[in-house]
Image: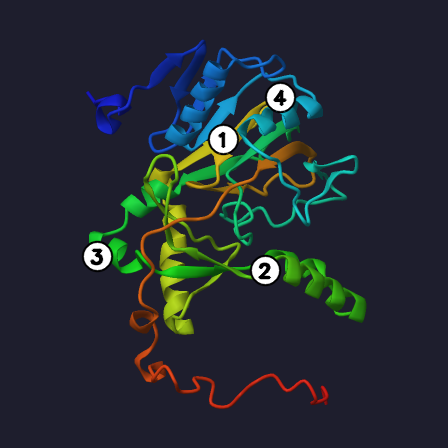
Amino acid sequence: MNKCAEARQGRPVTVEHAGVTVTRVGVNLGAEVSGVDLRQPLSDKAFRAIEDALVDNGVIIFRDQYITSDSLMDFGRRFGELTVHPFAPHEEKAPELIKFRNDENNPPFGTDVFHSDETFRAEPPMATVLCAKEVPALGGDTIYVSMSAAFDGLSDRMQRFISGLEAVHDLKPFRALFGNSEEDRKNLQHFERLYPSQVHPVVRIHPVSGRKVLFVNPQFTISIKDMDERESRSLLDTLFHQALIPEYQFRHHWAPHTIAIWDNRSTQHYAVNDYYPQRRFMERVTIRGGPVAGVEPADPVSVRKAKYLVPAHADRHGGHKPQRHVSGN
């Protein structure tokens, strides 16, 4: 007879504190929370139990929560300040509230790839709260993956190799929203100034649990800083593949009035795009995060290709520089 997950993972399957019951539903991440009505004010002790459950399980699920948009925002604010997504569809009077109304005339965009939300920011979100209002009869699941488990699953040698490396994150999927007109190019430049590419550690340290997290994703991560393009691409492909391993995943099947909260500091997710043209209506708020801390950065000299190693005083760009006086011809 197989031993239960409690014996394998060293954590109980079910815990209860301050009237909040947390039941694990996945081995490496995922738990359901009961005993809570999010329409009602939460005591500080009950909220701390929810915060602890989020850190311990990566994603937590609340079922049968018949809450309003205002209540959803109020609940999100218990975790911290809400942010405004620069591109997502939102409520006009409450820009913090994202509304995904997908149907035959408005197919989903850019969510069917593993990612942690908005890592193109200098300080990516701490967590995301998503509430299902209307779901398709079939399909529309969300797959979550523990990037702590993904890191732990790498060989010791690979863990040592990537620790200290840094990766460049960019708003690349949203570049498709801009055309080639002069106005579109100016608009894109405006957002590039607001959200320049950011450098985050490949291995981050979770600020609460202290666990190491593999912090690269195929939606926003474009390269390893200072690394040759071919080596960078090969390494990122290898690291991206860790999110595809089923043992590190938890697949959530939505029902109306279900709320999921995920920890963007330790998880990634993938919204399965298999339900078009059925309707799917979700509301979301995102909680502001903080700086991304990792282990001590590697010496750039140890990352660069040997032929690029030149003395510090030398011009590494061979005299090339922007020539503002030259026309575009």
Label drawn at residue 172: 2
Residue under label 4: 257
Q: Earlier in the sequence, mark 4 or mark 3?
A: 3
Q: Earlier in the sequence, mark 3 or mark 1?
A: 3
Up the image or down, 110 lies above or below 45; here it is: below
**Does dot 2 land on a helix, a strand or a loop?**
helix
Q: CA distance from mark 4 to mark 2?
A: 32 Å
Q: Quadrant of the N terminus?
A: top left
**Does dot 4 land on a helix, a strand or a loop?**
loop
Q: Quadrant of the C terminus?
A: bottom right
Confirm whether residue 63 shows in the render: yes
Q: CA distance from mark 1 to mark 4?
A: 14 Å
Q: CA distance from mark 3 to mark 2?
A: 31 Å
Q: x, y percentage for residue 287?
A: 57, 36
Instruction: Give the image quarter of residue 164.
Output: bottom left
Instruction: Identify which residue, 292 or 57, lies in the foreground.
Output: 292
Q: CA distance from mark 1 to mark 2?
A: 27 Å
Q: Amino acid at mark 1?
A: His
Q: Amino acid at mark 3?
A: Arg
Q: x, y percentage for residue 223?
A: 45, 65
Q: Amino acid at mark 4?
A: His
Assess disc 4: are there few (<14), some (14-19) or many (≥20) residues with their C-alpha within 10 Å of its C-alpha.
some
Q: Earlier in the sequence, mark 1 or mark 4?
A: 1
Q: x, y percentage for residue 17?
A: 40, 12
34 relative position to 184: left or right: left
Label drawn at residue 35: none
Instruction: Give the image quarter of residue 20.
Output: top left
Up the image or down, 3 lies above or below 101; here it is: above
Assess disc 2: are there few (<14), some (14-19) or many (≥20) residues with their C-alpha within 10 Å of its C-alpha.
few
225 relative position to 180: left or right: left
Which of discs 1 and 4 lies nearer the camera? The answer is 4
